[in-house]
Structure formats: structure tokens, C-alpha cells
Amino acid sequence: MATLLHIDSSVFPTQASASRAVTEAFRKHWQEQHPEGTVVYRDLAAEPVPHITADAHLAGFVPEAAHTPEQAAAFAERVKLIEELEQADAILIGAPMYNYTIPSTLKAWLDNVILMGRTAGENPSAKGTPVTVVASRGGSYAPGTPREGYEYVQNYLKAVLADALGLDVEFIVPELTMASKNPAMAELVPLYEASRDRAFEAAEARARKLAERLAA
């Protein structure tokens, strides 16, 4: 049976987080198709992974036999995360926009799993694995909007996940999530609700599509 690697990075609980609500819906529909499958779950807000250190970084460029004790310990933590990535049949990432970009906890995870010569480079070890990114945001940064130039979530994650790691990336973007909370955005509530509904529909459709593809 297929394995889903599910990563959340929102600092808020599901009832207050647009990204968590949509990733939860995706996971629910996935598990309906794979009741005996495996879900590897990482909540990066509750249990952050270590930020990359000099020892962890340098260990990726030194033969394991030559690792110092500090490098060996740090690299072992990286390998654990890398193997989760490599063993996944599909990946689900909740990536809310904080201050125009991704949470630092998600960046720390990426810094650990990007390893030249293994997960990145000429022949990435997880190449082709489908990854679904729920990229929620309080406003709108879509093409043609005033803040289009401030969109550093999808652009960055496409470069890292698709170009560097060779993953098959699809984005689900619930936007204007602050409309129901900010009186100044009240007129945008209908657009927010439409975006939210599309996100849940897309999550269900994507989960079922991937489940069917992997079961074939």
C-alpha cells in the first residue's frame, strides 16, 4: 500500500488554520482510498526539526567514514528526514504564507532534505514523486493583483521542490483567508468563501486521483 508523507507547518490549530483544514481534508480522502496504507506525519510547529548546522551541512560533502562524531550525529538526523522523503509515494505539505514567505520551520525541513548528489543534483532520489502543496494566504498574490510581486511561497517552493528535488508539484491556494476576520476586507468575504470551497474540492479531487494512480 502507498505511503503518504504529510507535513504541516502552520502555528495555528486546525480550526484556526486554513492550510491545516485543507491538508486534513486531503488526508481524510486519501485514507478512505488507502485504509491500510501508511501516513507519516510531521507537525513542524509542534515538533520542529533542527535548523541546519555547519556539522550537518558539511557532513553532506564528506565521506561518512571521515565524519567527526558531531557530523555523524547531525547527519543521522538529516538522513532520517531524507529517507522519509524518498520512501513516500506521495507528499502533502501545508505551507501558509507568513510575512510573504514560508514558515521558518518548513525552511528548516527543506534545508535538511536537500542534499546534493542524493535528493538534489543530476538524478534526484525522489524524482517524480507527486507533492501537493496547500499554500494558504491572508490576502491575494495572484497574477494581476497589486501584491503579485510579493509572492515568495509558490515561486520559491516550485524552484526547490520541482527544480531542485525533481518532484511533481501541484499547488492548492486558499486565499483571502483574513477576509472573515478583518473588517477592512469584509467586501472580499464572498471571494474568500469561493476560494475556500475550491480548495477543499481540489484537495478531495487530488487525493482521490493520486490514490487511484498509485493503486493501479
Image (cartoon, rainbow, N blue to C red):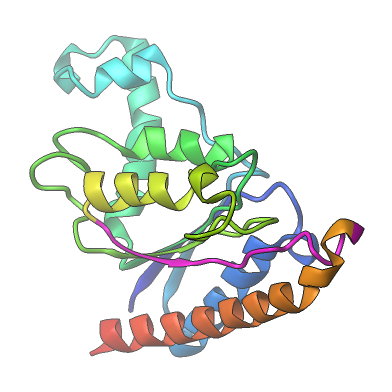
Q: Quadrant of the C terminus?
A: bottom left
Front residue of this view, candidates 77 and 96: 96
**Residues shaded magenta:** 167-183
Q: Decide whether residue 40 is among the magenta residues.
A: no
Left or right of 142? Residue 171 is left
Front residue of this view, candidates 61 and 64: 61
Residue 177: x percent and y percent? 72, 63
Front residue of this view, candidates 84 and 184: 184
Res. 47 image quadrant: top right
Res. 173 image quadrant: bottom right
What residue sits 52% from the left and 51% below the top? 148
What residue sits 52% from the left and 35% below the top? 49
Residue 93: x percent and y percent? 49, 58
What residue sits 49% from the left and 48% below the top? 153
What residue sits 48% from the left and 33% below the top? 108
Left or right of 55? Residue 25 is right
Extreme residue in the right direction = 183
**Residue 49, above or below 208:** above
**Residue 190, above or below 181:** below
Residue 145: x percent and y percent? 56, 58
**Residue 74, above or below 153:** above
Q: Is the magenta region chiefly helix, strand or loop? A: loop
Residue 31 visible? The answer is: no
Front residue of this view, candidates 151 and 35: 151
Q: Decide whether residue 172 is among the magenta residues.
A: yes
Res. 91 image quadrant: bottom left
